[in-house]
Image (cartoon, helix red, strand yellow):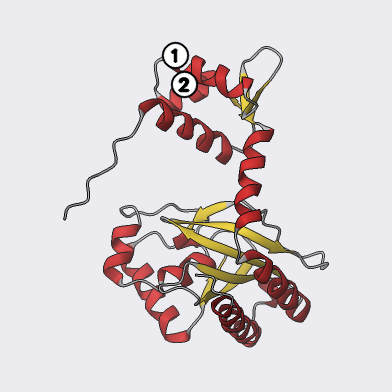
């Protein structure tokens, strides 16, 4: 039996592309820049924008020259978090990890070639690293993503990621295929992932997969200020993360959550 590619509805596809681009932007975009980015016919783009603004998925400035994400996009995004059965359990585990190691702790899920942050618990330490819920980063540039990519075979990883060179977030980001595959093999051997300043300068991260699904789709990480990220400290945090991830996976399986 062959699986046919779904036939996409053009207007729906364009609407989603608009929302995704504006969702990734740090600030509202001008309609002119959005048109240059998308290349849609101006009349079609303006009709879509007017509809999305009227339904409060987007917001525009007074003269309509710039647009940004609106409140109804937030409502839909939080509905995903509210309905995910794993997150209440993960929240408690993240708080326990944060209190034990005193570093900001994250929970994320693999989404194609990216990871999406679903939970974060910050430490009171002034050196903390902040990462908001809903943030999306390339999997190859994060400890969370690399530990989940390591759940896959090298062939599966190659099929999932875009062609090299991969996106570079900092000078330390691994962008070539062979060094990344070597890093993932080391992650499989260790049982946890490491990254130093690969997506955020001054920060090292440790990640562990939560094995309630096979292959794992969810992971936990801790962000550690670089001066504190000695080999001994990274190993200490990794042990805490692996134990917590195993306990969380056991809880989720016992609750029938897959």
Mark-to-mark CA distance, 2 and 1: 7 Å
Q: Is residue 237 above or below residue 47?
A: below
Callout 2 secondary element: helix
Callout 1 secondary element: helix
In terms of image quadrants, where is residue 216?
Answer: bottom left
First reached walking from the N terminus: tag 2 or tag 1: 2
- Which residue does the numbered mark 1 point to in the structure image? 42
Q: Nearer the viewer, residue 4 or 45?
A: 4
Q: Nearer the viewer, residue 32 or 23?
A: 23
Which percent across, then down, holds residue 92? 72, 72
In terms of image quadrants, where is residue 254?
Answer: bottom right
Which percent across, then down, holds residue 74? 66, 41
Is there CB contact under 8 Å for labels 2 and 1? yes
Q: Is residue 120 above or below residue 183?
A: above
Per the rendering, the mark at residue 32 is: none
Which percent across, then down, holds residue 164? 32, 55
> Residue at image x 65%, y 27%?
56
Q: Quick check: 109 left or right of 44? A: right
> Residue at image x 77%, y 75%?
102
- Which residue does the numbered mark 2 point to in the structure image? 35
Q: Quick check: 77 left or right of 46? A: right
> Residue at image x 62%, y 22%?
53
In terms of image quadrants, where is residue 84?
Answer: bottom right
Single out the residue that lies furthest toward the left: 1
Which percent across, then down, holds residue 176? 35, 61
Would residue 102 be seen by someone viewing this image from the given angle? yes
Q: Give the class, few, some or many, for how many residues have Cα within 10 Å of label 2's Cα (few <14, many ≥20).
A: some
């Amino acid at each position: 039996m062959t699986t046919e590619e779904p036939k996409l509805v053009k207007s729906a596809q364009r609407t989603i592309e608009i929302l995704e681009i504006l969702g990734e932007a740090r600030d509202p975009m001008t309609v002119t820049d959005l048109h240059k980015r998308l290349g849609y016919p101006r009349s079609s783009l303006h009709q879509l924008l007017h509809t999305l603004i009227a339904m409060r998925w987007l917001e525009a400035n007074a003269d309509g020259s710039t647009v940004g994400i609106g409140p109804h996009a937030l409502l839909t995004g939080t509905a995903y978090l509210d309905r995910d059965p794993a997150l209440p359990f993960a929240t408690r585990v993240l708080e326990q990890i944060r209190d034990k190691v005193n570093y900001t702790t994250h929970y994320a899920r693999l989404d194609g070639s990216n990871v999406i942050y679903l939970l974060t618990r910050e430490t009171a330490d002034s050196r903390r690293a902040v990462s908001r819920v809903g943030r999306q980063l390339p999997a190859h540039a994060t400890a969370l993503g690399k530990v989940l990519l390591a759940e896959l075979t090298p062939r599966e990883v190659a099929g999932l990621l875009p062609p090299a060179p991969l996106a570079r977030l900092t000078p330390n980001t691994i962008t070539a295929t062979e060094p990344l595959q070597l890093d993932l093999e080391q992650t499989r051997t260790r049982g946890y992932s490491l990254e130093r300043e690969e997506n955020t300068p001054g920060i090292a991260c440790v990640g562990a997969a939560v094995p309630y699904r096979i292959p794992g789709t969810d992971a936990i990480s801790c962000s550690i200020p670089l001066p504190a990220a000695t080999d001994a400290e990274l190993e200490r945090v990794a042990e805490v993360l692996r134990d917590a991830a195993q306990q969380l996976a056991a809880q989720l399986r016992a609750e029938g959550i897959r």
